[in-house]
Image (cartoon, helix red, strand yellow):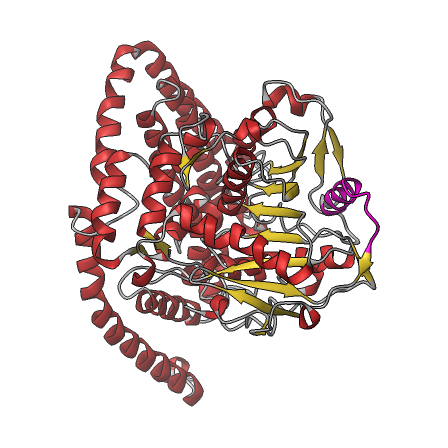
Amino acid sequence: MTDTQETDHSPAETSEFARQSAEFVDLMTRLQAVLARAQQTASAKVTGEDFSIVDIRSVAEAYLRALPTFFERPFEAIEQAQHFWLDWAKAWQAAWTGEGGKVADKRFRDRRWDADPVTRGLRDGHLALENATEEFLKLLPQGTKESLRVRFYTRQLLSALSPSNFLMLNPAARERLFETDGRSLLEGFRNLVEDLERGEGRLDIATNDPQAFTVGRDLATTPGKVVYENALMQLIHYEPLSPDQHRRPLLFVPPWINKYYIFDMRPDNSLVRFMLEQGHSVFLISWVNPTREHAAMSFEDYMKLGPLAALEAMERATGERRFDILGFCIGGILVMATLALLAARGDDRIATATTLATMVDFTDVGEIGVFIDRDRLAALREHMAEKGYLENHHLQDMFSMIRENDLVWSFHVMNYLMGQKPPAFDLLYWNADSTRLPAAMLLWYLERVYIENGLRHPGQIILDGTPIDLSKITVPCFVLATKEDHIAPWTSIYPTTRLLGGPVKFVLGGSGHIAGVINPPAGRPKYGYWLRDDYPERPSDWLAGATHHPGSWWPEWGAWIAAQDDEPRVPARRPETGALPVLEDAPGRYVLAK
């Protein structure tokens, strides 16, 4: 066989190469079209012409103010640097001798990171760098905004520099490149272009399959009827799933940062369905997705047109005047503010209250504090002056940066390096289905609740002309926090146990802000939860004496709320036979608005 014959390509190979080349040219054309917009967007954010959750000026100031600390403590800084070099050298030595072994970090869980000494060294050397940097930054003053920003953005940089994020350093991505004859690289490029196009120049990293679910068909399928609506919400009354029900109806108040169906995902992880099966008459608020027309809607409007309007509608629908109420995240903050208002007015319509992942003491807001101060508030006010709302992607970006390895870089690897599409995952689908926020509500909330910590101080916040005081809330309260919550840290939720004036049951669930809440009973217990009957001042002391229970916290809540009710049950209430007219079937049109 001649040399020429040995290098000949088959017609199929030639055809595939031509096809990939044509696809590449097409993607390059699309990329050029979107890059101009991307450059404009990036430039506007850096210069401050457009709002960005990352303020370059405040980040630079934080690092400049941090530098003197290291100069003032030179010997400690040098000692930390020496520790890093020693640890880094040990990591590489262990990698070459094969002593390194597997690590717990999810970025490196693929077995191919153990395949050769160079790959092991890259992995272990980077982990040594991250650990050493964390120790080094402990020299900074504790509790200052500048120190928090330096730690946060340094971690962002190190996470970005992880060898797992680079095609030729990631063994799994590199192997896939060769296995697919380069097809994975082309598909990754396609995913990148599509994400830029979807974000109109902003990189909108896909974290879910947008075609996998349809609200009303796959999610939010529990049967019910919309029986009331106003400018801010629709009220859904669900069909019963038991022959009789507790006398007191139960109202769900979801956050308005995302859609309500976090409470009603699929049948096997629907909290709404679970409570219906426990014999509760369930009503739920479905918030509107605000537009410019809602710009002047305030936090007070959310209270009056939200839970207060819902309670009045529920009384008309059922004839009852005593209710149970539940709120999640900012919906829980609204519930607490509403309870304080009702307490100040001597209104006893609420019999029990439940809050999920809800802070009312903002002394320590965790890493979200990196993004929120009065300078950012002024920039936000200017940005929203014309549109009247904050676009949903800003909060998505903020929450993703708090868990950057899980919500940014893992999808960078999957989408762009491996050339794959994200799998169908209901919680991430919901997470991406976020909403806009009206200007008046958001500015008041950030200033009065977040920055000034107004809920913590009696009488500092006035709603509908009434000063409110959380200590006047005397109804029994069930307070759930989750141990790995990066949005509402459990140690910042725990003070609720000492701020309220009535009996409190505090439960600490496993996992994070979403998965820890949507943790249904299942055959194989997932995260578990912790209980303790007394509440020491410090959260760490409480946890040290708490008892861990396997499985879901849902039955614990169901038993608690049932124990607060000694009235006889009533025949099941159906929305079609209530006093309110049926407006449309659940899930209603508000939740479908983009």
- State the residue lying farthest toward the bottom: 11
Q: Is residue 383 left or right of residue 227?
A: left
- Is 360 or 39 nearer to us in this picture? 360
- Does residue 145 sit above or below 483 in this rendering? above
Task: Say which residue appears at 23% left-offset and 40% top-offset.
Answer: 378
Q: Which residue lies at the image location 18% right of the left edge and 65% below the top edge?
A: 36
Left or right of 582: which side holds 89?
Answer: left
Looking at the rendered image, the quarter that the N terminus falls into is bottom left
Indicate the quadrant containing the C terminus: top left, top right, bottom left or bottom right: bottom left
Whether residue 421 is situated above or below residue 112 in the rendered picture = below
Q: Position of residue 498 (x, y in %)?
A: 59, 23
Q: Is residue 559 magenta?
A: yes
Residue 30 at x, y percent in the picture: 26, 74
Answer above or below: position of 229 versus 473: below
Q: Which residues are magenta?
A: 554-569
Residue drawn at x 30%, y 45% as measured from the top left: 53
Quarter of the rendering containing residue 527: top right
Q: Is residue 506 visible?
A: yes
- The answer to which of 502 and 556 lies nearer the viewer is 502
Q: In this orientation, which residue lies closer to the viewer: 469 or 442?
A: 469
Identity of the residue drawn at 26% across and 28% down: 62
Q: Is residue 352 magenta?
A: no
In the displayed structure image, the side of residue 373 where residue 503 appears, left or right: right
Counting the numbered discs, the total is: 0
Q: Main secondary structure of the magenta part?
A: helix
- Residue 3 visible in the current orientation: no
Percent across and percent down for residue 239 are 70, 67
Q: Is residue 209 left or right of residue 538?
A: left
Give the percent coordinates (x, y) of residue 477: 65, 36
Q: Is residue 185 above or below residue 101?
A: below
